Amino acid sequence: MPTYFYKARTLSGEVQDGKLQVSSQAEAASILQKQGLFVTLISDKPFDKETIIKKEGAGKALKKEVVFFGHISDEEKMVFSVQLANMVNAGLPLLRSLYIILEQLKNPKFHSVLQGVYHEVEGGTSFCDALEKYPKVFPPYFTSSVRAGEATGQLGKVLERVAAFAEHDMEVKQNIQAAMTYPIILIVVGAGVICFIITGVIPSFVSTFLRIGIELPLPTLIMYDISIILKKQWFFVFLGVWACIYFVRAYIATPIGRLWLDRTKLNLPFMGQMVERFSLSRFSRTLGMLLGCGVSVLSSLKIVQRNVDNEVYSRAIDIVYKKVEQGARIGDSLKEAKVFPLDLVQLVTVGEETGRIADLLNRVGDYYDTTSKYSIKKFMAMIEPVFLLVLGCIIAFIMAAVLLPIFDMMKLTRQA
């Protein structure tokens, strides 16, 4: 029977190594996991000191080759979570799983980050501590769940939950982005057409009418003045627009500005319902996933507060956190926050009483996901006629500015 050598860590973080005589590498991993060990490496060859020193030296050299530029998309993070969960659940050691994923990565930025994680774990650092060195890549809910998985010896199951959450979260974001794409296209195309008419068509019409001696009506004068400003003072117009955008973004970056923006979005007709359902879904799913992974209630609430992406709900969760810290139940604390709907509060209360809070929170998340999809459809059904109405009014004003002088010219022609 072949001998397999392993490196693993106990639940307290102590590094262990040894050997097992088993029929396969998968059987060795299964035996070690049942003993409560977190497997980092299994090989059919012994780990001699020279080899380890060479590996650690290569790791330090690789870590110097850091890629500072580039972007890691949510889709790439989600794929990484799914791949890692599948491999660890299949019995592959963590280091072997990370190595396989590294070999497939095409994004140089993500490759550089995972290289750093790989060599940290290879050097004896816990997986969670290695991930926490890259907070801009791995969000708090991911690292906290991994820490809970390592502490309980259930990393595979925890990664599976995290992967499912990441996949669902990305799907919801894509639905929101898809809903906003059409209005943005309408705005850009409409603004382009209007600018072309104002700067290209109106001046030629007006110059013709002025030569004939026709007195220009008010709409035409307004459009002509706008066209002159856009042509001759375009730099100051651009500077003014840029300054407005800059100051608005600077204000929104402040806590008061962010609160005002998020509160305004929640109060907007049609869009407010969509934003509310999305925030409640994210709150329920994140909290349910973290509690299901074994993360403590207070730690879970802190992570959810950063992950909910809405200042109104973030401040409400802060109230809940303080109440729970004082010994109150989550359901009672949610009720006192006066932001969360009654059905969510009641289900959380029932979950606390029955010990099934994580499961019920996930079900609440499913409910809000379904209702958010209907809210998106409703928003899309209303946004098209609203934009067409606004665009139609602007085009009607422009047409009036063009046609009124033509009517005056025709009257002069008839009188002549």
Image: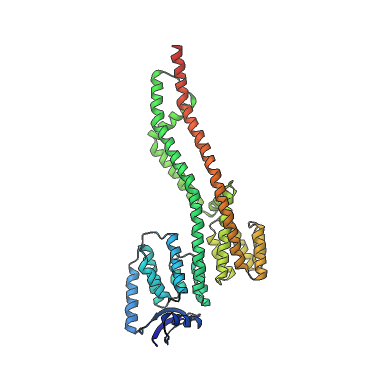
Horizontal side, residue 286 vs residue 20: left or right: right
User: Which residue extends farthest top?
Assistant: 416
Q: Is residue 320 visible?
A: yes
Q: In the rendered view, how is the structure colored?
A: rainbow
- Residue 8: x percent and y percent? 44, 81
Q: Quadrant of residue 52?
A: bottom left
Q: Which image quarter is the C terminus in?
A: top left
- Residue 350: x percent and y percent? 67, 66
Q: Nearer the viewer, residue 285 or 116?
A: 285
* Total count of labels: 0
Q: Nearer the viewer, residue 268 or 78?
A: 78
- Residue 154: x percent and y percent? 51, 75
Identity of the residue drawn at 58% across and 68% down: 298
Identity of the residue drawn at 67% across and 62% down: 346
Identity of the residue drawn at 53% across and 61% down: 306
- Residue 5: x percent and y percent? 39, 84
